[in-house]
Amino acid sequence: MAIPLPNDVTTFQDNWRFCNHCYCLWWNGRPDNGACPSGNSPDGQHHGQGSWNFYLPANPGEAI
C-alpha cells in the first residue's frame, strides 16, 4: 500500500538512516555521522548498522 504524498512534494532526499542507539533518523551524508544524544553510543555518534536507506519527501522551493 502506497502512502499518499502532498502535491507540493517536489523531490526526495535519500541517505537517511535509523540509529540503533537513539532510535531516530539521521542524515548519513556527513563524514562523522553526527552526534547521537543517546548515552548508549560508544563513541557519541549515530550508528545505523543494518538500517535501510530512507527517502524523505521535500519541497526545496518552499520558504520557511
Image (tube, grey):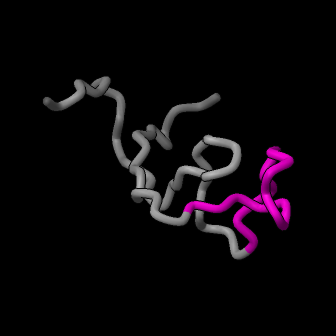
> Quarter of the image containing the N terminus?
top left
Nearer to me, 9 or 51: 51
> Quarter of the image containing the C terminus?
top right
Furthest residue to the left? 1
- Residue 47, given in percent of the width and then of the height, sits at 65, 62
- Residue 38, given in percent of the width and then of the height, sits at 80, 45
- Residue 58, given in percent of the width and then of the height, sits at 44, 40
Q: Is residue 5 left or right of residue 46?
A: left
**Is 33 inside the magenta-drawn segment?**
yes
The vertical placement of 6 against 14, above or below, is above
**Residue in the image at 70% along x and 76% along y:** 31
What's the magenta region? 32-48
**Residue in the image at 75% along x and 71% along y:** 32
Nearer to me, 51 or 54: 51
Q: Is residue 42 left or right of residue 50?
A: right
**Residue in the image at 35% along x and 28% along y:** 8
Which SS type dominates the magenta stretch? Answer: loop
**Is 42 inside the magenta-drawn segment?**
yes
The vertical placement of 53 against 61, above or below, is below
**Residue in the image at 24% along x and 27% along y:** 3
Nearer to me, 8 or 40: 40
- Residue 17, given in percent of the width and then of the height, sits at 52, 55
Furthest residue to the bottom? 31
Nearer to me, 51 or 14: 51
Q: Is residue 3 left or right of residue 40?
A: left
